[in-house]
Image (cartoon, rainbow, N blue to C red):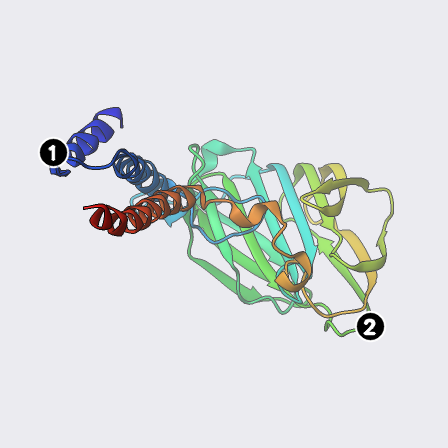
Amino acid sequence: MKNKTAMMITAHRHAAPRGLPPLCALGTLLLAFSLTTAFPALASEDHSQHNHPDSAAPAVAAPADAPMPTASKEITIGSMKVSLMPEYDSTSVLVINEGKFFNREAFPREVLFFLPLGVTKLTDVCSLSPGGQHFCQLFDIKQGAEKNLLNVKLPYSDFFIDFQYAPFKAKPNSERDFTYTVESDYDIKNLSVVIQQPYRAERFTIEPAGGKEFEKEGYQNYRYELKDVKKGERKQFRITYFKADDKPSVDAKYTGMSETHIFRGYTSVLILGAGVAGIGALLYLRGRKSPKKEEQA
């Protein structure tokens, strides 16, 4: 990076005419620094979709040459986190499932997850590599009697799945009431369920009570930690609250521009913009000084 910056600065020095004002030369240096700083940063930024709080790695295509063994061996989920976010970025409930299978050596293989009835589309179905990359996966959803079944082939033991579902219709001045069931086709050693309270929600309650309350990015959350959840064991959470409006939590009308995450990922753009603005200001000042020199002559 230092060599590249030096070459660009040298090029600008040779291209500049004699008598170039010091301010303009300074602006040229600022633009050169902005370009060498901004473009590598833009290339490395993560523009993957999730705008979900806990997803950070870009999604890429799944490896095509990975063999898929038979799913005969019994496997266990070592840790799994289920996040429930009612009316977060839409009037539906955002659900995020992320976890790690304990049996890393059993992958790649096909696995089964349960979805609420009515869910036929998913936002993300990913397998995470040891390096943290998200590999998008093909999947198949079949409708069951009490729940839908998601079949997906995972090349790695770590997974990330998120989707939206609508257990209620959001209306102004109404109470929301829904029950979410966490159920797995595998034993889970450590299960964490995190439920986020929407902005402007009143009389927010969860049954069963007892979740550990904490705040994250301005939201109130409730965490439930469960150990040794057996295959097919159902953990139900009933969530009720009143809301005077039908707008999601991230609606710009209510959150405003003061949210710190709004400018996240745009540092390089701001640096480049500052460099261009600086050059423009210097050229403007130089243009205003020229008529005065002609009058003096």
Farthest-out residue, top: 2
Q: Amino acid at mark 1?
A: His
Farthest-out residue, front: 296
Give the side of residue 282 with respect to residue 119, left or right: left
Residue 61 image offset from top left, x and y in percent: 35, 50
Q: Which residue is mark 2?
A: 173
- The residue positioned 58% from the left and 53% from the top of the image is 113
Compare residues 48 and 131 and report the one nearer the observer. Answer: 48
Q: Is residue 222 above or below residue 202?
A: above
Q: CA distance from mark 1 to mark 2?
A: 68 Å
Q: Amino acid at mark 2?
A: Asn
Q: Residue 193, located in which quarter of the rendered image?
A: top right
- The residue positioned 58% from the left and 40% from the top of the image is 99
**Mark nearer the N terminus (1 vs 2):** 1
Q: Is residue 67 visible?
A: no
Q: Secondary structure at mark 2?
A: loop
Compare residues 132 and 143 and report the one nearer the observer. Answer: 132
Please rate how many residues cluster around mark 2, counting C-alpha atoms within 10 Å: few if below 14, some from 14 to 19, many from 20: few
- The residue positioned 78% from the left and 73% from the top of the image is 172
Q: Is residue 170 above or below residue 283?
A: below
Residue 230 image offset from top left, x and y in percent: 71, 42
Q: Is residue 225 above or below residue 287?
A: above
Q: Secondary structure at mark 1?
A: helix
Please rate how many residues cluster around mark 1, counting C-alpha atoms within 10 Å: few if below 14, some from 14 to 19, many from 20: few
Residue 27 image offset from top left, x and y in percent: 30, 39
Q: Is residue 145 above or below residue 53?
A: below
Determine which of the numbered discs, if any, sits on residue 146 in the image.
none
Residue 68 image offset from top left, x and y in percent: 38, 45
Q: Which residue is mark 1?
A: 14
